[in-house]
Amino acid sequence: GAGVSQSPRYKVAKRGQDVALRCDPISGHVSLFWYQQALGQGPEFLTYFQNEAQLDKSGLPSDRFFAERPEGSVSTLKIQRTQQEDSAVYLCASSVGRSSGVQYFGPGTRLTVT
Amino acid sequence: GDSVTQMEGPVTLSEEAFLTINCTYTATGYPSLFWYVQYPGEGLQLLLKATKADDKGSNKGFEATYRKETTSFHLEKGSVQVSDSAVYFCALSGGNTDKLIFGTGTRLQVFP
């Protein structure tokens, strides 16, 4: 079956531009997570959805970052007025539901801000 | 807050050598513990997990035991192969959202 997909796989943005990153979770998965992975580091949590409800956004680094999942399936992570420090790989993961433990990761979107 | 510390890499081994990658954690409550692996050019994949103290997770010849007394979850394999070359991440989850907290990753390089 299809896994988690993300698009685009690579994005180059000029500083100050807005970007939108898409995540298609595994069908039927209730939980969806976004992580940010800087070069040579482990992924860091950004935000969490249960269905369409954003239950935790404590990891979003600034108010330039915004995420939504309006119908409880596809999610979009938006970054406004991109800065060089936003350059990273953005990972999406989904899981069956609360306390299932296992998260399935997409391939990531590599964002480079020039 | 919760955190994971794992040994720095790269770890360089010859094929068939014994592997240990150390991982320790700090957490309130009783987290679940995971090892994820990232092969070159691929996404993160779950390697194994353990959900309570003294549980042993195992997969593909890799093992790790949840040690509450030492707050550790070390990854071991008795005989590594070139195909095991990858970056290995230790992680924990818990609390209200099951978000994962990762270590910084350990690169393993296995030479024939």
Image (cartoon, rainbow, N blue to C red):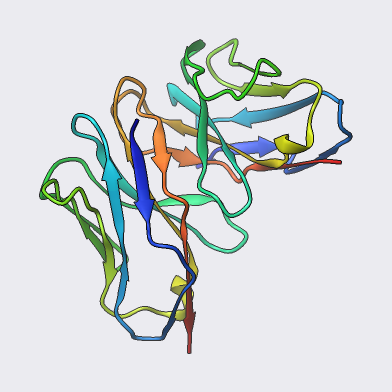
Q: Where is residue B73 shown, x and y percent of the image? A: 24, 54
Name the residue furthest right.
A14
In front of the other: A104 or A35: A35
Q: Where is residue B89 in the image (x, y as percent from the top left)?
A: 42, 53
Q: Quick one: A25 or B21, which is closer to the camera?
A: B21
Asked if B112 appears above or below A77 in the picture, the reply is below
Would residue B91 be seen by someone viewing this image from the given angle? no
Residue A76 versus residue A104 in the image, above or below: above
Q: Which residue is drawn at 61% across and 22% down?
A: A75
Please give the count of numbered marks on the rendered protein: 0
Q: Is residue A38 left or right of residue A81?
A: left
- In this view of the protein, which residue sits in the foreground, B98 or A94? B98
Return the residue found at the far front. B1
Residue B83 seen by the camera: yes
Q: Say if B54 sits above or below B1 in the image.
A: below
Task: Name the residue located 50 percent from the left edge and 47 percent from the top edge.
Answer: A42
Residue most extreme to the bottom: B112
Identified at 29% across, 24% down, the residue is B95
**Residue at 58% over, 55% down:** A40
Q: In which quarter of the image is the N terminus of chain B?
A: top left
Please state the horizontal and vertical placement of residue A72, each as a whole percent of the image. 53, 15
A37 sits to left or right of B96: right
Q: In this view, does A36 lie above or below B83?
A: above
- Left or right of A56? Residue A114 is right
Where, by quadrant of the figure, is residue A110 drawn? Answer: top right
Residue B34, horizontal then vertical, whole percent: 32, 47
